[in-house]
């Protein structure tokens, strides 16, 4: 086998690195950010601050400090957490990874609050704020495998080309009765009528109104946090809802989605109900998705690059973006379906895709083109589950589209009719998805080898833990029959 030339290696490496000037600008931004935080907290008489770090699963890790200590820690760059938070699994265990990825010393990392993300926490009585933090080593180098940093890197690739991704997520979730016994199936909650839903009420207005007290508070809390949500609809499942976000900058929307999931869970608890973003929480009901609408505009003039300026038809860039999604999304499925439960959602005739075909206004395909004027031309990625980390789901979706554009790929022909009659080409299990994820060189080139290996190690640890569990199905059907 011949050795790739230096030119070939460079051509296939899409990761961005910060220059000395950019690091210097970062220090200045930190000073400006501190001044903004000081003013913001003082105006609202904030007493405590929650510092949030989204981990690999999208769980909010972090610490809580009195506001005065928070500001002092930011000024002294002494706001720290152990690096191992990024290898913590959903069960609270830690993945076993190579020392080259993270040493056994479990060093502290520095938290840098992203000042633009600071919000009130409206469900507390005492004045409390929350702020999302980026993570850095002591030398100022960012943590390469931090989910928010991964999305930043993908956006940097777009910006280097003069492109600006625009996204709009649609997030589905279920309301269920409080369930403290994990061996028992979940049940729809009791609404204002005093009865639970027993049938599907797709787009039912009165069905949504059953839970008015919850959703009125959700909208109030979102307004207090500047979370820009749009419409609320009842989805196909019993007590299944969907919230649409207004379109905008990918990082801002990822931050909003991260905060929104926390907001809905906390609001539901205040009404003695659970809100769950599990991909498939109820048997014989549809799963919950996070559909991602995405387009690309010119960074200078804001023109939608997915539509031909002369005639409004699909641009070559749009078709290449779709082709990139078709080719590479199956290799990024662990970021779109990160849990063993995720793959139960991907079943035909349950409003979920089984492949990456595309079509106009077709909800059976993995990639749907909504009917819209040229300025609204976009593609809807329907693969991601509601359980996905929003930073990683958006990063994966945009990364695949980016690869298609820079490699000038050509998509398949659009299909009419049901895509369910065609082959199931998406992974059927988390294990299958991880094998594909670790094997693709192009995906590694945009996401980074270190991130791929750390993320895969975390998810394999979770998969190993799952394999040790004996399910009720096994006890019911195998105990006395085999």
Image: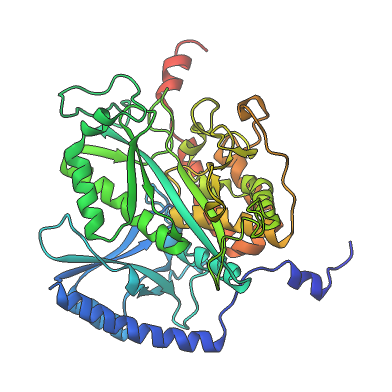
Farthest residue, direction top: 481
In the displayed structure, would residue 387 be above or below residue 6? above
Relative to 131, is 288 above or below? above
Residue 359 pos. (x, y %): 62, 38
| Rendering quarter of residue 224 | bottom left
* Residue toward you, 438 or 220: 220
Q: Can residue 56 be seen by looking at this rendering? A: no
Residue placed at 42% from the left, 19% from the top? 475
Q: Residue furthest front?
A: 311
Q: Is residue 285 above or below residue 245?
A: above
Is 236 drawn above or below residue 44 in the view shown?
A: above
Left or right: 339 with respect to 437?
A: left
Q: Residue at x 44, y 81 (%)?
A: 138
Residue 427 appears in the picture as rendered:
yes
In the image, taking residue 10 as reference, residue 294 lies left or right, namely: left
Q: Is residue 97 left or right of residue 317?
A: left
Q: Front-most of 263 and 138?
A: 263
Coloring scheme of the render? rainbow
Q: Hey, which quadrant is residue 398 in on the image? A: bottom right
- Residue in view at x 52 percent, y 13 percent: 482
Which quarter of the figure is the N terminus placed in? bottom right
What is the tally of numbered marks visible in this picture?
Answer: 0
Q: From the top left corner, tell me how far across and down residue 181 is, in percent.
A: 27, 31
At horizontal 71% and vertical 55% (from top left) the residue drawn is: 316
Q: Is residue 241 left or right of residue 150?
A: left
Percent from the top left, x then y, of residue 202?
Answer: 37, 28
């Amino acid at each position: 086998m011949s050795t790739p030339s230096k030119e070939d290696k460079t051509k296939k490496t899409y990761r961005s690195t910060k220059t000395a000037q950019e690091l210097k600008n970062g220090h200045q931004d930190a000073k400006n950010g501190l001044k903004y935080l000081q003013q913001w907290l003082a105006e609202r008489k904030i007493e405590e601050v929650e510092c949030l770090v989204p981990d690999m699963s999208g769980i909010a890790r972090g610490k809580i400090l009195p506001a005065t200590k928070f500001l002092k820690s930011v000024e002294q760059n002494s706001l720290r957490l152990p690096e191992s938070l990024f290898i913590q699994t959903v069960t609270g265990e830690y993945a076993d990874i190579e020392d080259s990825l993270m040493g056994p010393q479990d060093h502290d990392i520095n938290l840098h609050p992203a000042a633009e993300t600071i919000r009130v926490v409206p469900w507390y009585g005492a004045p409390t704020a929350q702020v999302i933090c980026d993570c850095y080593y002591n030398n100022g180098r960012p943590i390469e495998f931090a989910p928010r940093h991964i999305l930043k890197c993908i956006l940097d690739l777009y910006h280097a080309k003069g492109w600006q991704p625009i996204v709009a997520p649609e997030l589905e979730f279920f309301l269920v009765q409080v369930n403290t016994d994990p061996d028992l199936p979940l049940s729809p909650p009791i609404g204002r009528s005093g009865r639970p839903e027993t049938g599907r009420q797709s787009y039912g207005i009165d069905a949504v109104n059953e839970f008015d007290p919850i959703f009125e508070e959700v909208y109030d809390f979102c307004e207090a946090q500047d979370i820009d949500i749009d419409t609320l609809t009842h989805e196909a499942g019993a007590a299944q809802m969907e919230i649409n976000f207004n379109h905008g900058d990918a990082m801002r929307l990822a931050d909003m989605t991260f905060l929104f999931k926390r907001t809905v869970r906390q609001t539901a608890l205040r009404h003695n109900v659970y809100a769950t973003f599990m991909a498939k929480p109820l048997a014989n009901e549809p799963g919950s998705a996070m559909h991602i609408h995405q387009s690309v505009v010119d960074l200078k003039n804001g023109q939608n690059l997915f539509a031909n300026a002369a005639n409004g038809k699909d641009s070559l860039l749009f078709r290449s973006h779709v082709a990139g999604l078709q080719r590479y999304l199956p290799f990024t499925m662990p970021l779109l379906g990160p849990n063993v439960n995720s793959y139960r959602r991907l079943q035909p005739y349950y409003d979920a895709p089984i492949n990456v075909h595309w079509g106009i206004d077709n909800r059976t395909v993995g990639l749907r083109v909504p009917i819209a004027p040229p300025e609204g031309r976009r593609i809807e990625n329907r693969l991601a589950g509601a359980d996905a980390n929003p930073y990683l789901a958006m990063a994966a979706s945009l990364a695949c589209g980016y690869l298609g554009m820079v490699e000038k790929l050509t998509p398949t022909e659009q299909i009419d009719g049901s895509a369910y009659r065609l082959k199931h080409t998406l992974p059927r299990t988390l294990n299958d998805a991880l094998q594909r994820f670790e094997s693709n060189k192009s995906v590694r080139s945009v996401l980074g080898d270190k991130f791929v290996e750390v993320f895969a190690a975390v998810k394999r640890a979770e998969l190993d833990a799952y394999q040790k569990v004996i399910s009720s199905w096994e006890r019911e059907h195998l105990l006395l029959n085999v």
